[in-house]
Image (cartoon, grey):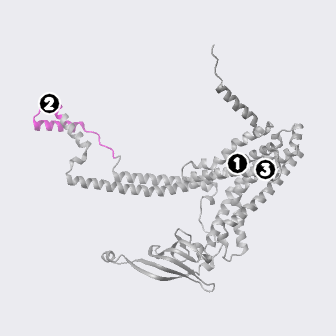
């Protein structure tokens, strides 16, 4: 039995490592096409580019490893079934579960290694990738400018937004908006231009930004408030405006400089658990504080004072003495009717011109509160998205380790059922199953980030869907049944319709 276990394990390991190398090679080439624009025309040497893709490999392992387990298990057990090696094992009294024992032990060890990899190696590689991409963007100024959003121009104390970049090295710009910053990091100058062009030379540390057909706005700083109201800003129109930007900092870029910036993907389990508790506490504190502020502004939920019955009786007695009415019940009914009337429509207590002021004030207050609620809603949505991302990253580390074990129990019995080895049919089936697994995970992640489903469900959904499939396939492979018996399904459908069409006999 030990020889059989070693034989099965060696065949599986050969398929596993060969599939891993091939798939990693394919995914690296896909990554090259994704990041080709970040490297082209920047004068980067091959060592820097090689380091970048080396740092990308751990991140790609999240996609490559589950597919490798699925494909290698289908290839191994499909080859055994195709060559009637399983039939020989069963004739010798060796069941499918017994033949899988050594591989099950290996998959448990692989799951533990995968968890360590996801907890330690992948966060470190994400940190390296983030810093390297940030530093590479400084090598060419045009790369630091993104289309459609405001981008920080490193070393120039300015934000720039362009609608479109085109031409050689993206030197030509359309619909340019620039915000110049002061020493206190305040945007006091706005420049808008229809077109722009970036001009530079290798011998100079000065970049020329030539803007054409635009306007220049600048806040005028005045000591007196009266003068500021008269001349709040300066405005000018220009046909050509040239800005000189010092690029000395761009030419001294350390591409491997580390910056202490952390996201959810750059944290291990202990750090994620700690930050999740902190984020949850901060979010609840902000919600409570904002709710209390809104309640105070609108005067809602103010506790009412209990009715003083003695004071009520004294008022009735006072009215009785004043009107000289003998029946206290009539006085009480009159006072209660007056109170009910005023309580039902408080506005009637005021004059007509006061009613208009009261309604306008209430309308403005309600509008201001609604605006504040909408603004706070966007802030809270962003905060809870960050909170959900941390929960997702935490549980995906566990889900990745367990998915390798579950996908093995999907691929191994599936290979024994289809009884086909080689790269053809097993590769197609493995890719189809992996695409189902992968896209379910992607959709679940997106829904979880937007708080449409719970983040824990989003992290585990694709793995939990594969769990019943693995159990069903293992049972069918153990019972030596096919993937699906279409004849029995058709017979059941026919029997169902026969029972529906048959009429009961009457005695």
Which element type, helix, strand or loop, lies under badge 1?
helix
The stretch of residues the image draws in magenta is 302-331
Query: Residue 337 vs residue 8: left or right?
Result: left
Q: Position of residue 11 (x, y in %)?
A: 85, 51
Which residue lies under the disc numbered 2? Answer: 327
Viewer-nearest residue: 18 or 168: 168
> Which quarter of the rendering shows the C terminus?
top right
Count neighbours of disc 2 (C-alpha within 10 A) and say few if under 14, some if 14 to 19, many if 20 or more: few
Report if residue 317 lies within the magenta region: yes
Q: Position of residue 415 (x, y in %)?
A: 79, 46
Q: How many marks?
A: 3
* Looking at the image, residue 161 lies above or below residue 376: below
**Of marks 3 and 2, the one in the foreground:** 3
Count neighbours of disc 1 (C-alpha within 10 A) and say few if under 14, some if 14 to 19, many if 20 or more: many
Separation of residues labelled 1 and 3 (CA atoms) = 22 Å
Which element type, helix, strand or loop, lies under badge 3?
helix
Residue at the spot x=61%, y=70% of the render? 134
N-terminal-most mark, 2 or 1: 2
Which residue lies under the disc numbered 3? Answer: 426
Residue at the spot x=78%, y=50% of the render? 426
Separation of residues labelled 2 and 1 (CA atoms) = 84 Å
**Of marks 1 and 3, the one in the foreground:** 3
N-terminal-most mark, 1 or 3: 1
Tell me, yes or no, if residue 67 can be seen here: yes
Q: Position of residue 503 (x, y in %)?
A: 64, 22
* Looking at the image, residue 489 lies above or below residue 6: above
* Looking at the image, residue 187 lies above or below residue 74: below
Which element type, helix, strand or loop, lies under badge 2?
loop
Q: Are marks 1 and 3 in contact (CB under 8 Å)?
A: no
Q: Determine which quarter of the picture holds residue 332.
A: top left
What mark, if any, has residue 402 been given in the picture?
A: 1
């Amino acid at each position: 039995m030990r020889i059989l276990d070693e034989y099965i394990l060696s065949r599986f390991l050969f398929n596993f490592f060969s599939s891993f190398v091939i798939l990693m090679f394919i995914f690296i080439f896909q990554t090259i096409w994704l990041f080709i624009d970040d490297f082209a025309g920047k004068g980067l040497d091959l060592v820097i580019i090689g380091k970048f893709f080396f740092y990308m490999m751990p991140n790609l392992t999240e996609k490559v490893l589950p597919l490798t387990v699925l494909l290698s298990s289908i290839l191994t057990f499909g080859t055994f079934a195709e060559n009637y090696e399983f039939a020989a094992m069963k004739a010798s009294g060796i069941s499918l579960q017994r033949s899988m024992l050594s591989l099950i032990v290996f998959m448990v060890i692989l799951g533990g290694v995968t968890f360590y990899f996801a907890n330690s190696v992948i966060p470190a590689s994400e940190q390296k990738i983030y810093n390297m991409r940030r530093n590479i963007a400084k090598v060419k100024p045009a790369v630091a400018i993104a289309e459609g959003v405001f981008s920080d121009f490193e070393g120039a104390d300015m934000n720039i937004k362009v609608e479109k970049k085109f031409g050689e090295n993206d030197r030509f710009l359309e619909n340019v908006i620039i915000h110049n910053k002061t020493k206190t990091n305040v945007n006091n100058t706005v420049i808008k231009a229809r077109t722009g062009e970036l001009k530079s030379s290798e011998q100079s540390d000065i970049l020329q930004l030539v803007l054409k057909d635009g306007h220049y706005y600048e806040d005028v700083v005045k000591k007196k408030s009266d003068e500021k109201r008269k001349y709040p800003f300066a405005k000018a129109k220009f046909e050509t405006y040239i800005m000189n930007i010092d690029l000395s900092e761009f030419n001294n870029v350390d591409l491997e400089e580390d910056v202490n910036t952390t996201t959810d993907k750059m944290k291990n389990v202990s750090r994620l658990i700690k930050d999740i508790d902190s984020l949850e506490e901060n979010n609840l504190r902000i919600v409570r504080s904002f709710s209390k502020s809104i309640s105070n502004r609108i005067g809602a939920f103010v506790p009412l004072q209990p009715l003083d019955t003695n004071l009520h009786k004294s008022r009735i007695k006072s009215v009785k003495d004043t009107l000289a009415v003998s029946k206290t019940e009539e006085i009480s009914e009159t006072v209660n009717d007056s109170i009910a009337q005023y309580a039902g429509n408080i506005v009637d207590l005021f004059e007509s011109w006061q009613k208009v002021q009261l309604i306008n004030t209430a309308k403005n207050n309600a509008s201001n509160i609604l605006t504040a609620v909408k603004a706070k809603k966007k802030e809270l949505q962003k905060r809870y998205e960050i909170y959900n991302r941390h929960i997702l990253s935490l549980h995906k580390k566990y889900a990745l380790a367990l998915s390798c074990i579950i996908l093995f129990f999907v691929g191994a019995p599936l290979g024994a059922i289809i009884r086909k080895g080689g790269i053809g049919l097993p590769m197609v089936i493995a890719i189809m199953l992996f695409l189902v697994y992968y896209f379910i995970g992607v959709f679940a992640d997106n829904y979880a980030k937007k708080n449409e489903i719970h983040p824990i469900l989003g992290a585990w959904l694709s793995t939990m869907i594969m769990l019943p499939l693995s159990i069903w396939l293992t049972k069918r492979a153990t019972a030596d049944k096919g993937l699906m018996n279409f004849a029995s399904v058709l017979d059941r459908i026919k029997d169902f319709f026969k029972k529906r069409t048959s009429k009961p006999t009457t005695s």
